[in-house]
Image: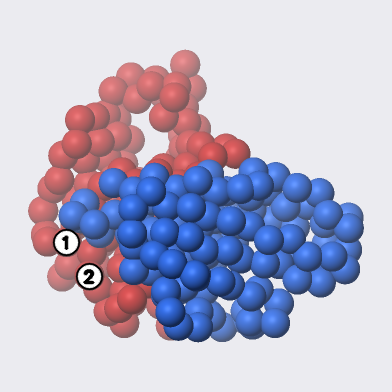
Chain colours: A red, B blue
């Protein structure tokens, strides 16, 4: 079957750095994406990795290792507004396969 | 990237009735995706809607329960038919963001409660 594994919950302190890992097992792979979803809101696209390596977008970075079927989202200089759920998703053939989501709790 | 207007944003419906959810995209897109998300859970793909052809449903979802229309390249509807409390969920439409690394844009969602 196809699956993505990510931690259910991560807690960090405001101003710190946090890493959310994602391992995947899918029949096809066309890239790993990350989405942020605040309570009551819709998912919003954060980043995409199609090739191995690090992609940086402001305070957020995402990494992919296709040989390890592994990626992570790195959030720096955490702010309270970053409190949300974060989903990794793999584009497999014609659709997205979603992880279960990681709830990021930020403490002041 | 595309902007999606989804409505209604929320509704409370009686069991046995049907609700139609609409999504309007501000640009032409080939495929539109319909998802269901239980609170605190991940997204589950219901179906993929292509203009001019029948929607493709994922395992566990059938056309009689979730009929989809896709009359043109900017609009789609999802109907939740003969509703039961188990259909209470958030329903989301989505399109692919062309030229943006294969990310997807979502509508604001429809929070459905069946009583």
Instruction: List x then y, in percent, for residue B52.
Output: 43, 79
Q: Secondary structure at mark 2?
A: loop
Distance from label 2 to label 1 (Cα)?
6 Å
Q: From the image, which quarter does the C terminus of chain B lie in? A: bottom right
Nearest the eye: B84 or A49 = B84
- The part of the image, by quadrant, that contains residue A2 is bottom left
Q: Residue furthest top?
A: A108
Q: Secondary structure at mark 1?
A: loop
A24 w.r.t. B88: above or below: below
Question: Label 2 neighbourhood size at 10 Å, few (<14), some (14-19), many (20+)?
Answer: some
Give me the chain letter of mark 1. A
B39 w.r.t. A100: above or below: above
Give me the chain letter of mark 2. A
- The part of the image, by quadrant, that contains residue B15 is bottom right
Instruction: List x then y, in percent, for residue B42.
Output: 53, 58
- The part of the image, by quadrant, that contains residue B38 is bottom right
Q: Is residue A87 visible?
A: no
Q: Is residue A108 visible?
A: yes
Marks 2,1: beta carbons within 8 A: yes
Residue drawn at (69%, 56%), measured in percent from left and top? Answer: B89
A61 w.r.t. A76: above or below: below
Q: Which residue is mark 2?
A: A30
Question: Label 1 neighbourhood size at 10 Å, few (<14), some (14-19), many (20+)?
Answer: some
Mark sitting earlier along the chain (2/1): 2
Residue drawn at (22%, 70%), measured in percent from left and top? Answer: A30
Q: Which residue is mark 1?
A: A50
């Amino acid at each position: 079957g196809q699956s993505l594994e990510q931690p259910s919950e991560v807690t960090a302190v405001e101003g710190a750095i946090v890493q959310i890992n994602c391992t995947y097992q899918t029949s096809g792979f066309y890239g790993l994406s990350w989405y942020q979803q605040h309570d009551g809101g819709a998912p919003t696209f954060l980043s995409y990795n199609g090739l191995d390596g690090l992609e940086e977008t402001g305070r957020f970075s995402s990494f992919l290792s296709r040989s390890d079927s592994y990626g992570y989202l790195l959030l720096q200089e955490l702010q309270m507004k970053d409190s949300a759920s974060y989903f990794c998703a793999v584009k497999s053939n014609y659709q997205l396969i979603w992880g279960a989501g990681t709830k990021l709790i930020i403490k002041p | 990237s595309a902007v999606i207007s989804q409505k209604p944003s929320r509704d409370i419906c009686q069991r046995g009735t049907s609700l139609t959810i609409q999504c309007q995209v501000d640009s032409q897109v080939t495929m539109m995706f319909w998802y269901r998300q239980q609170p605190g859970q991940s997204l589950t793909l219901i179906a993929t809607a292509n203009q001019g052809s029948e929607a493709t449903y994922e395992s566990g979802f059938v056309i009689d329960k979730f009929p989809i229309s896709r009359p043109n390249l900017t609009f789609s509807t999802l109907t939740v038919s003969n509703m039961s409390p188990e259909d209470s969920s958030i329903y989301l439409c989505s399109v692919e963001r062309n030229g943006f690394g294969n990310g997807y844009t979502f509508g604001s969602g429809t929070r459905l409660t069946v009583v």
